[in-house]
Image (tube, rainbow, N blue to C red):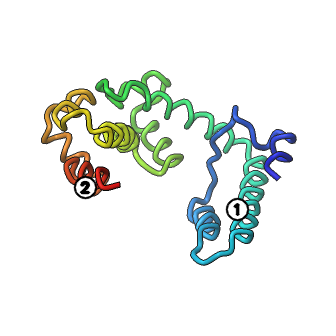
Amino acid sequence: MFDLWRKRGVLTSDRPLYHLEPLPYWLRRFEEVVAPNLPALERVCRLQSALSSAFTHYQRNPAAARDAEWLAEVSALLDADLGDVLYVGDVPRKLGLSAETFRKKFARLSGMPPWRYRMTRVIERACLLVHEGRLTNKEIAARLGFNDEFHFSRRFKQITGRSPTQFRALSMRH
């Protein structure tokens, strides 16, 4: 099935993002795929069915394609140089949008405000650095552009639910 979708141009690496509305409907569709106690074959069939519906829905909605391309472009801007301080307010200026229009559009398409998206990406990078275990929390904080270790620890816990020290201890056990 995946090979057929690739041959038909439905599944391509040049369009890796699909944004589907309404989100609650599509969330339910994909939650059905991971429902507990499903036999593997039924899980694969449900996944193919959900993806097929998503691709069909997406192809009928050219605005969704434009939105997905915009979101991919903006996400790349927000993902760039995670160790550098990025003023999220600079991004809308690069795109020729007002800060409010940018914030609303990004939140609608991604499900979170741009500052939270950026902070989540920074903390994902921090998780990798903590897991590697070569740097102290203070060094990680400095590398990722935090004012100090306390600020880093507070944001880390806000995103992951654990302090960097707790996260480090858990990752050492696994």
Going from N to C along the chain, the mark reached first, 1 or 2, is 1
Identify the residue at image location x=16%, y=34%: 138
Specify the quadrant of the image occupied by residue 71. Answer: top right
To which residue does mark 2 refer?
162
**Picture coordinates of residue 105, whole percent (x, y):** 50, 42
Residues at marks 1 and 2, CA–CA distance in whole angstroms = 32 Å
Depth order, front residue of 69/52:
52
User: Does 122 sit left or right of 69 as displayed?
Assistant: left
Secondary element under disc 2, as helix, strand or loop, is loop
Specify the quadrant of the image occupied by residue 50. Answer: bottom right
Q: Which mark is residue 84?
A: none
Q: Are marks 1 and 2 in contact (CB under 8 Å)?
A: no
| Residue 139, above or below 51 | above
| Residue 35, above or below 131 | below
Secondary element under disc 1, as helix, strand or loop, is helix
Identify the residue at image location x=65%, y=75%: 38
**Picture coordinates of residue 21, whole percent (x, y):** 62, 56
**Picture coordinates of residue 135, whole percent (x, y):** 23, 33
Q: Amino acid at mark 2?
A: Arg
Identify the residue at image location x=27%, y=39%: 133
To which residue does mark 1 refer?
47
Depth order, front residue of 99/58:
58
Q: Amino acid at mark 1?
A: Leu
